[in-house]
Image: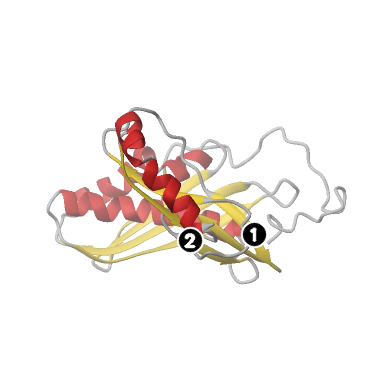
Amino acid sequence: MRDKILKILKENKEFLKKQYGITKLGLFGSVARDEKNPNDIDIIFDFNNPKFDLIDMIKIKHIDGHKFEATNGKEILVIDTDKYSPVELFITGMGNCSLFDVVEMAKNKGFEISNAKMEIEYKRRDTFPKIFTEFHFIYKFNTNADNVTAKRWVLSSLETYCSTINTVRATSKIFYTIIVNGETIAYKESIISGNGGEMTLESFHDDDDGFGCACCNA
């Protein structure tokens, strides 16, 4: 099947380039490995000045046991939920998003930044749905920027640029601590954020649906 799909892509390359601005095409996943009876066809592409809007998409499939494979069309990530739960991945995504913002803002402004780390403390409701109620993001990094500038990077991420944190900001209290060059310049300060998850949501016990909410119970 791999050769057949590659032939189709090659035959339509010029049309796709003209119609949609696609410049590169390729295969990945089971078809690229020429496995028998693949479930789907995974195509990766690149383009310049696209003539259409794309919806961001993540694809996930079950491998076996508690292992899953996720792809964004560029890389494949194997997730073992026995070792790293979906809830932990969600929190990791928020932290990575914000720390990435801070590092990039520093570099874009011509400052040095090194040893950037983050710790995240969080709280959730005791009843289902166990939504998040509080986050405490602890930033640690070294830089030659002054403390005011360093704090501005963190607040810019928390309040504006980090979409993952701002997704939960309406329902979760957001606190932050900043340690720069070993000095604590802000300790558990807060930004304008939610009411700690005190929303009108129906609560239920984990045996009500027969599944036990394995994902969010982790």
Numbered disc 2: secondary structure: loop
Q: Amino acid at mark 2?
A: Ala
Q: Residues within 10 Å of mark 2 (few under 14, many from 20)?
A: some
Marks 1 and 2 sit apart, C-alpha to C-alpha, by: 12 Å
What colour scheme does the image use? secondary structure
Q: Residue at x 35, y 34 (%)?
A: 15
147 and 41: which is toward the camera? 41
Q: Position of residue 62 (x, y in %)?
A: 66, 60
Q: Amino acid at mark 1?
A: Asn
Question: Which quadrant of the view contains residue 16?
Answer: top left
Q: Is residue 63 above or below residue 8?
A: below
Q: Position of residue 87 (x, y in %)?
A: 60, 57
Q: Residues within 10 Å of mark 1 (few under 14, many from 20)?
A: few
198 and 209: which is toward the camera? 209
Q: Residue at x 50, y 43 (%)?
A: 57
Q: Which residue is mark 2?
A: 32
Q: Which residue is mark 1?
A: 37
Residue 136 in view here: no
Quadrant location, the N terminus: bottom right
